[in-house]
Image: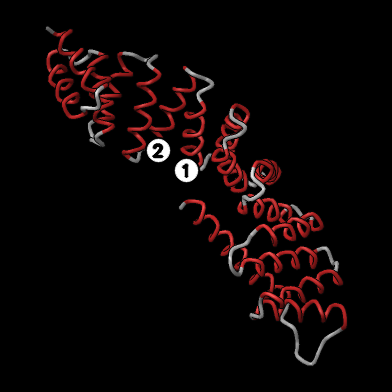
Amino acid sequence: MADDRVAEAEAALAAGQLMKARTLAVEGLVDDPSDPRLLRVAGKASLELELDEAARHLRALVKVAPNDVDGWRDLALAEMEEGDISGSATAFARVLDLAPHDTSAMVHLAHARHAMGQTDEAVSLLLQACDLLPERTDILRSLVGMARAAGANGTALEAARRLAEQDPKDVLAALDVAELLLAEGDYRAAAAAFYKLRSADVDDGHEAFACHAQAEALVRDENWRQALDVAIDATRVDRHQLTTDLLAFIAAKLFGEAEREAKSWPEIDAALAAERAEHRRMHEEAAVL
């Protein structure tokens, strides 16, 4: 009779009859609270139903079946649903102990570690996942963001370049490459990357953003003549204050102060940084949609 009830609960779960499966399993656990098959059904069904009891059933499951990879994985997801990031990380780490090449667990654990402030470890996990699944753009994009947060710009740049190579139309990847080159002080390469971005980013008004950033890279490289050409070119697509201020600053460096005093570089630099952040925000939001 007990075996029949377990089989019925498992059949209901397989058929997607989640509430029936959960009810049958919970009823069975009254008589046999340590049955791993019933705990698995109760935990899985409760997880799918987004019930708070899921983690409790799954903790009981991995206690009686400590090598159950699926049980640990479901527990990790249930802990995540409860907002227990540390508990979720512990469970995903156990999944990797049992299944070292489980890339899904690597990525989940990386995000958990990152949320816990353990960004270096998160980056290491994503690098492993990228080695196993080099074409997964979502993993590469996460690696770019986490590596930047960790200050590992070289790692972030390599990942961004791989994204850009996979999809030359990926504007966010192209922007990452250009910004990372700028952050690394490779100003000539950054200027070239922003120039490339000018034709890649076809959104209305965005060419001006790339022009400004290209001019910034050239200013930092003290390539004043080319910076002036880019600033003048920016007036073709944008005549707002930042373009005017940038042009006046560069012209003053080349030809001396004009009648109207140009804004200082710290003021312009702050405006450029704010514009680049807004430009990034636009594309990050578009990538989510």
Whichever of labels 2 and 1 marks the residue nearer the N terminus, that label is 2
Badge 2 density bin: few <14, some 14–19, many ≥20, Cα 10 Å: many
The front one of 86 and 180 is: 180
Residue 45 vertical position relative to residue 169 in the rendered view, above or below: above
Residue 22, image quadrant: top left
Residue 139 vertical position relative to residue 177 in the rendered view, above or below: above
The front one of 149 and 14 is: 14
* Residue extending furthest toward the bottom: 259
The image position of residue 275, as x and y in percent, is 61, 68
**Would you say the residues marked 2 and 1 are in contact, meaning their CB atoms lie under 8 Å apart?**
yes
Residue 254 vertical position relative to residue 105 in the rendered view, above or below: below
Q: Quadrant of the N terminus?
A: top left
The residue singled out by tag 2 in the image is 85
Identify the element where label 2 is drawn: helix
Q: Residue at x 64, y 80 (%)?
A: 240
Identify the element where label 1 is drawn: helix
The image position of residue 150, as x and y in percent, is 61, 45
The residue singled out by tag 1 in the image is 115
Q: Which kind of residue does numbered mark 1 sit on?
A: Ala
Residue 220, image quadrant: bottom right
